[in-house]
């Protein structure tokens, strides 16, 4: 394997399948299968999951809701997704721990960096829920932060396209795909890879980001092997 420790970033929408919202158990099971495959190959795996399939804080704020309240609701949505994935993984025999950025001791452990690293060292899949635990920060930023905190070697951003394009390939047939692109180019071109705060955090700490299509079976395993999958930002 090219990587010993990774952080996988999933959007909440990735859990919806063909539904308009909520969680599709079949999709969660498929994701769990892919995570199990790389864990069994010896890779230490951590994950950050968004909550957009249930509630998105920014969307709530644009409709008049207090932004802090809306973001807290979004954090709770990520916890629902994290627990769903934890359950799917454990049903497949994968030891898993969910760590929350918000304190909810009756539900799960509170995030502590050293505890998270110890779980990874023991071979457990670690899911980081509730974002950073603070409003005004996206789960993209949470992924960049947690990856740096636990000393991951790469952030793997799972999407429904096979990399980063110069424009939306679904709208512009002339769009070209990048095999590799710098952080600075992502910011200058305004490419929607992750939000600017997450990109800046990864750039400052030299944390590479791999953007790839996880809907294609075997892509995650190919990515951790170092095969030519997706677009590398670094």
Image: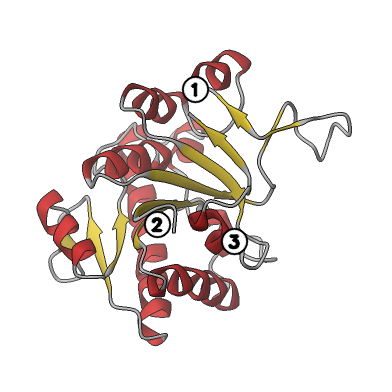
The residue tagged 1 is 183
Q: Quadrant of the N terminus?
A: bottom left
Asked if labels 3 and 2 touch by Cβ distance under 8 angstroms, the answer is no
Q: Please, what secondary structure does the residue beneath circle 2 have? A: helix
Which numbered disc, 2 or 3, marks the residue that appears first in the sequence? 3
Q: Which residue is mark 2?
A: 77
| Residue at left offset 81%, top offset 40% | 170
Mark 3: which secondary structure? loop
Q: CA distance from mark 1 to mark 2?
A: 29 Å
- As measured in the structure, the alpha-carbon distance from the residue carrying label 3 to the one carrying label 1 is 32 Å
Q: Secondary structure at mark 1?
A: helix
**Residue 224 picture location, percent across and down:** 48, 56
Q: Work out which residue is located at the far right of the displayed protein and give it.
A: 173
Rendering quarter of residue 149: top left
Residue 216, x across and y down, in percent = 68, 62
Calculate the distance from the C-alpha at mark 2 to the C-alpha at mark 3: 12 Å
| Residue 90 quadrant | bottom left
For disc 1, the neighbor class at 10 Å (few under 14, some 14 to 19, many from 20) is many
- Colour approach in the figure: secondary structure
Closer to the N terminus: mark 3 or mark 1?
Answer: 3
Among numbered discs 1 and 2, the one appearing first in the sequence: 2
Density class for disc 3 (Cα within 10 Å; few <14, some 14-19, many ≥20) is: some
| Numbered circle sitting on residue 21 | 3
Of 90 and 13, which appears nearest the observer?
Answer: 90
Q: Position of residue 75 (x, y in %)?
A: 34, 50
Please name the residue shown 63% across and 45% down the image: 230
Dot 2, how many residues are within 10 Å of its Cα: few (below 14), some (14-19), or many (20+)?
Answer: many
At x 36% / y 73%, what residue is drawn?
86
């Amino acid at each position: 394997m090219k990587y010993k420790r990774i952080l996988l970033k999933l959007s909440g929408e990735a859990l919806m399948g063909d539904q308009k919202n909520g969680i599709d158990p079949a999709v969660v099971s498929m994701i769990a299968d892919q995570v199990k495959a790389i864990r069994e190959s010896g890779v230490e795996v951590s994950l950050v999951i968004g909550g957009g399939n249930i509630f998105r804080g920014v969307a709530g704020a644009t409709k008049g809701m207090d932004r802090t309240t809306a973001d807290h609701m979004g954090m709770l949505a990520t916890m629902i997704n994290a627990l769903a994935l934890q359950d799917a993984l454990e049903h497949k025999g994968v030891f898993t721990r969910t760590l929350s950025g918000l304190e909810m001791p009756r539900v799960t452990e509170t995030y502590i960096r050293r505890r998270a690293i110890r779980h990874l060292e023991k071979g457990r899949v670690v899911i980081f829920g509730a974002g950073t635990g603070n409003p005004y920060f996206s789960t993209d930023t949470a992924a960049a932060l947690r990856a740096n905190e636990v000393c991951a070697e790469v952030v793997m951003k799972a999407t429904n396209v096979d990399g980063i394009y110069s424009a939306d390939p679904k709208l512009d047939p002339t769009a070209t795909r990048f095999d590799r692109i710098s952080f600075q180019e992502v910011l200058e071109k305004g490419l929607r890879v992750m939000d600017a705060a997450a990109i800046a955090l990864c750039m400052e700490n030299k944390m590479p980001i791999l953007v790839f299509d996880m809907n294609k079976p075997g892509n995650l395993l190919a990515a951790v092997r170092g095969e030519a999958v997706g677009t590398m930002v670094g």
